């Protein structure tokens, strides 16, 4: 056995001890080690789909494993088979995929660093190229919102759609549309300074600027933009100082006819906890709703994404999925990922039997109705902690751990804002919730016993 094969065998032994057996069999067994030259370790994965999923979900697991087995200087390189008939491949170094998570981390720089970027070409707009209008598939449920977005992109700040306030449930394409608008503006108006930012990151930047006494730089940077796209504005609820800063930025930009694009899971009127003066300004332009996709749009999305991912899906399977998965685009994408993984694992074609198996598993997860209070109760019962102690200011390790697990599970299962979750878990602030979630995620990646404990709590939660 070649040395690189031996090294990969050692990596698999480590990974097998970290991740659940089903995850290992589905996502790591199909990987083929190809070479180890210089400090670059090359592995082959079955498809672009596979690569994107690994980078999104298990990049940290792979990095920790490579560091441990080969060394911290080793670089992981993916090779993807793109044409089986000719043997054509394409290589991607780890970390090269631009995902929303990676973009958000980059966006957390100190505002003072941004303030130096006075020219559009110097500013990182934080836009993801793959989220364009070209693959924002149009249907009856999103046609009007898309048209509004295109009008804004053609003449930013010069239409009646300022601000453009887009609302709708999770997973219907709000973030995709934001990036599409920003990318089109950059294409048509390269002289403009455009920035996409998640509300959570905006808040973190503001807190950091306040702590470092660089608030003037923060305000100067945001007030110098030509187009500001703020995603998930509901995450500013309860953050009075951050809301106040955004209010002044909003006023400044709007008075100068600069374009604002905002998204939320609620209408402006339903943003309880947002300052009334802010709510009134959110209503100044166009409020547009993104609805859940209708059956025809669901089928279009499935066909287009299957083609883009190199998947051959029979029409009867397309019809079946579109009929069963009705809530949002994200669920459709999840079923496609699971179908592809199941076909690779079983070395079989995608068919109705496999689709039914995946859909049944997906439906079982969707049927769970979980609240933050329910999560708290389950966690308290598991650790034998009474409610008063759980919500107190005590900082014993086991109590802090219980709160952090509750934050993690509440974020995973309830779709509530982090501020809302924090208020129901000992009245903690947004930053504490973010920290708690990250602590649990990182420990689950490296501590099998801890992960097993969290999974047991999840199992009880779903009963």
Image (cartoon, rainbow, N blue to C red):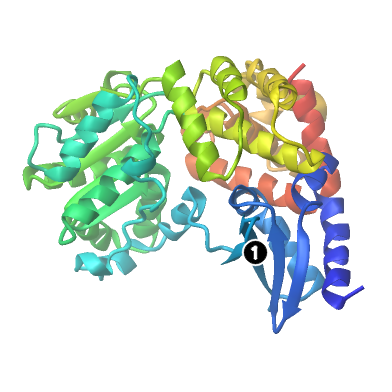
Frontmost residue, 375 versus 311: 311
Label 1 sits on a secondary structure element that is strand
Image-based side of 453 in relation to 247, left or right: right
Between 283 and 10, the one nearer to me in the picture: 10
Q: Residue at x 24, y 24 (%)?
A: 144
- The answer to which image quadrant residue 205 occupies is bottom left
* Image position of 107 (left or right of 11): left
Q: Quadrant of the N terminus?
A: bottom right
Residue under the image location 77 percent in, 37 percent down: 348
Residue 408 on image: x %, y %: 64, 37
Residue under label 1? 79
Q: How many marks?
A: 1
Quarter occupied by the C terminus: top right
Name the outermost residue toward the right.
Answer: 1
In this orientation, does residue 310 appear?
yes
- Mark 1 surroundings: few (<14), some (14-19) or many (≥20) residues within 10 A: many
**Where on the picture, by quarter, is residue 459?**
top right
In the image, residue 108 above or below residue 272 = below
Q: Residue at x 68, y 29 (%)?
A: 390
């Amino acid at each position: 056995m070649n040395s690189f094969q031996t090294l990969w065998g050692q990596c698999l032994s480590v990974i097998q001890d970290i991740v659940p057996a089903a995850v290992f069999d589905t996502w790591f067994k199909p990987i083929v080690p190809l070479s180890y030259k210089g400090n670059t370790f090359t592995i082959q994965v079955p498809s672009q789909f596979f690569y994107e999923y690994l980078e999104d979900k298990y990049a940290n697991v792979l990095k920790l494993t490579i560091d441990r087995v080969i060394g911290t200087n080793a670089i992981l390189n993916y090779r993807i088979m793109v044409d089986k008939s000719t043997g054509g491949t394409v290589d991607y170094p780890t970390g090269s995929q631009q995902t929303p998570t990676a973009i958000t981390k980059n966006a957390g720089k100190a505002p003072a660093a941004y303030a130096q970027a006075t020219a559009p070409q110097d500013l990182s707009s934080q836009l993801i190229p793959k989220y364009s209008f070209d693959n924002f598939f149009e249907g009856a449920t999103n046609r009007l919102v898309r048209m509004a977005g295109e009008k804004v992109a053609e003449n930013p700040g010069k239409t009646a759609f300022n601000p453009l306030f887009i609302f709708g449930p999770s997973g219907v394409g709000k973030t995709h549309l934001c990036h599409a608008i920003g990318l089109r503006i950059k294409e048509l108006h390269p002289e403009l300074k455009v920035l996409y930012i998640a509300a959570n990151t905006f808040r973190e930047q503001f807190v950091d600027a306040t702590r470092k006494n660089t608030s003037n730089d923060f305000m100067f940077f945001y007030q110098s933009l030509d187009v500001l796209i703020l995603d998930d504005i509901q995450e500013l609820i309860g953050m009075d100082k951050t809301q106040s800063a955004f209010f002044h930025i909003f006023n400044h930009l709007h008075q100068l006819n600069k374009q604002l694009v905002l998204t939320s899971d609620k209408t402006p009127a339903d943003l309880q906890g947002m300052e009334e003066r802010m709510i009134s300004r959110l209503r100044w332009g166009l409020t547009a709703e993104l609805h859940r996709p209708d059956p025809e749009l669901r089928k279009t999305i499935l066909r287009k994404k299957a083609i883009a991912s190199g998947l051959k899906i029979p029409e009867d399977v397309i019809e079946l999925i579109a009929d069963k998965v009705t809530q949002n685009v994200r669920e459709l994408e999840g079923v496609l990922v699971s179908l592809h993984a199941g076909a690779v694992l079983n070395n079989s074609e995608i068919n109705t039997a496999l689709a039914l198996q995946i859909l049944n598993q997906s439906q079982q997860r969707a049927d769970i109705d979980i609240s933050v209070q329910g999560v708290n109760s389950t966690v308290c019962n598991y650790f034998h902690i009474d409610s008063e102690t759980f919500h107190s200011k005590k900082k014993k390790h086991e109590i802090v751990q219980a709160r952090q697990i509750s934050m993690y599970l509440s974020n995973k299962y309830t779709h509530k804002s982090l501020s809302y979750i924090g208020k129901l878990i000992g009245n903690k602030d947004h930053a504490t919730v973010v920290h708690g979630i990250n602590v649990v995620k990182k420990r689950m990646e490296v501590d099998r016993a801890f992960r097993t404990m969290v999974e047991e709590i999840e199992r009880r939660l779903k009963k």
